[in-house]
Amino acid sequence: MFSYRHAFHAGNHADVLKHTVLIATLEHLLEKDTALTVVDTHAGAGLYRLDGDYAGTSGEAADGVLRLLAPKQEAAPVAAAAPAQGAAKKSTKPAATPDAPLAPAIQAYLDLVRDFNPNGGARVYPGSPFITHHLLREHDKLKLFELHPTDARTLDANIAQLEAGRQIAVLREDGFGSATKFLPPPSRRALVLCDPSYEMKTDYGRVLDLIGESLKRFATGTYAVWYPIIPRPEAHDLPRRLKTMATKAGKSWLHATLTVKSSKVLTTVTGDQKRPGLPASGMFLINPPYTLNGRLQPALEQLKDLLAQDRHAAFTLDSAG
Ligand code: SAM
């Protein structure tokens, strides 16, 4: 169960999508003075070293956040535009050129990552707990669930350095089973981020159970679910079922996906099968900020180009309500 370590994946293209959406969502929710509670059901270790052993082994950040932080002339490796889905169909021109200014949502994401690297470069990558805490105000609350013994210990130690007192709670509990105990929060404003590792097939069903139960308890909360787009029926069913759940409950939703490469398994000259690694991922939000669609559209157009690994790079952005 516990082989997944987010340190191998920190700052990859999936983190870029997830954290760009998280920041854009929080920025909107924090415009109102009333306290916000953020529940992070699968928090990870909180902070990651991009020059450390884990990230160095996988090198995933090189094709994610590090590409975006690279000098502009190096940051637009755009292959011939692919037949893209959804809004990507509108243009065959690369949205990101060396001279084009970055979309505000990408800029906000990169500015935040840079805040964790005051001496330049990107040695430190903030995970969702630190991204969230960086944006929260003193009267907001953050509830963090992490079950992996090592990551929970690291998260605890990282959070202790913030001296945030009662503002942040770290819980070594099952985020699927326990997150709803914080709903609704006293101020009746909450964002729930659900970002499991999907190591087990049952995670997909547990996400649906958690969101279903959460909506029953607190229908006006904002719910954000990250999921991998991989050749597995459960992964394709998840956004469909979340959409049905939101629609039946009369709630607005937003669905953003980012593909960076083909999902085809390659056969090498020696006949070995080479898996491509994670080719795409999605974020599904229920009760998203009404500004989110407009904020993400230009960002996804650019991310598709900036993070493309082959001509299959694409994005989709749909919403309703
Ligand atoms: N949200 C983090 C971020 O964006 O920086 C990354 C989280 S990572 C994708 C998923 C985490 O969930 C892993 O650290 C894993 O140990 C943890 N985990 C797995 N099952 C869990 C459970 N049932 N409850 C809480 N945490 C769990």
Image: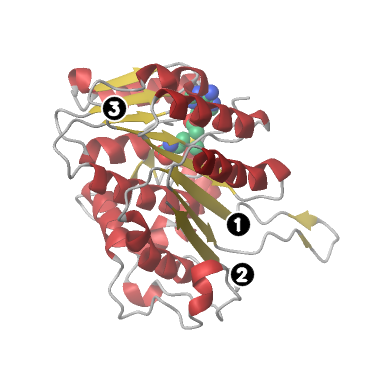
* Helix, strand or loop under label 2: loop
Mark earlier in primary sequence (3, 2):
3
Q: Residue at x 68, y 33 (%)?
A: 201
Q: In the rendered structure, which amino acid carries the disc numbered 1?
A: Pro
What is the secondary structure assignment of the residue under circle 3? Answer: strand
Residue 256 placed where, x, y %? 48, 55
Q: Is residue 247 above or below residue 276?
A: above
Residue 163 in view:
yes
Crowdedness of circle 2 by 10 Å Cα count: few (<14), some, many (20+)? Answer: many
Question: At which x and y percent is residue 156?
Answer: 34, 21
Res 31 quadrant in image: top left
Kind of residue at disc 2: His
Q: Which residue is mark 2?
A: 312
Q: Secondary structure at mark 1?
A: loop
Q: In the picture provided, is 85 more to the left or to the right than 285? A: right
Report the Cα–Cα distance between label 3 and label 1: 31 Å
Q: Which residue is mark 1?
A: 279
Q: How far across and how far down the image is residue 206, in percent? A: 59, 28
Q: Position of residue 137 (x, y in %)?
A: 16, 35
**Pair 3/1: label in front:** 3
Determine whether 61 is above or below 237 in the image.
below
Which residue type carries mark 3?
Answer: Leu
